[in-house]
Image (cartoon, grey):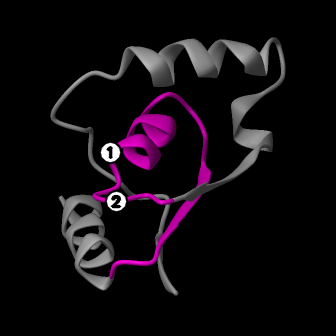
Amino acid sequence: MSVCGGADVAAPDDGDAGCSSALGAAGGARRADFRVLEVGCATGTTINALHDVGFSSVAGIDCSAAMVDAARKNLAR
């Protein structure tokens, strides 16, 4: 299993309506208080988006080493 993650991430290139609606489920809770693990993170688009809207503890895992490498490159931007 490969792992990627980090708090210093760049904005994703595209918007994600599904992610935005899921974020509403956090209600009035402080997003910084949540710890998020995305299983099947692929290129890291969702963990980038989560960080951009205030989730400070985000990480992703993927069974593809190539996807994790791509996610790490995207997170470094």
Answer with left or right where residue 12 lies relative to residue 24.
left
Residue bearing the label numbered 1: 45
Residue at image point 70% right, 39% down = 32
* Front one among 48 and 42: 42
Residue at image point 71% right, 32% down = 31
Q: Say how many tags the image has.
A: 2
Task: Assess whether residue 60 is covered by the magenta stretch.
Answer: yes
Residue 64's quadrant in the figure?
bottom left
Q: Secondary structure at mark 1?
A: helix
User: Which quarter shows the C terminus?
Assistant: bottom left
Name the amino acid type tagged 1.
Thr
Task: Assess whether residue 10 is covered by the magenta stretch.
Answer: no
Residue 44 vs 50, above or below: the answer is: below
Residue bearing the label numbered 2: 42
Disc sitting over residue 61 in the figure: none
Residue 62 vs 25, above or below: the answer is: below
Spot occupied by residue 36 in the image (x, y as percentages of width and height): 67, 51
- Which region shows up in magenta? 40-64
Answer with left or right where residue 61 lies relative to residue 57.
left
Residue 8 vs 70, above or below: the answer is: above
Circle 2 crowding by C-alpha within 10 Å: few under 14, some 14–19, many from 20: many
Q: Residue furthest front?
A: 63
Spot occupied by residue 33 in the image (x, y as percentages of width and height): 80, 42
Name the amino acid type tagged 2.
Ala
Spot occupied by residue 26 in the image (x, y as percentages of width and height): 76, 21
* Front one among 19 and 51: 19
Per the model, the C-alpha gap separating discs 2 and 1 is 8 Å
Residue at image point 44% right, 78% down = 63
Answer with left or right where residue 20 lies relative to residue 37.
left
Residue at image point 42% right, 42% down = 46
**Mark 2 near mark 1, Cβ–Cβ under 8 Å?**
yes
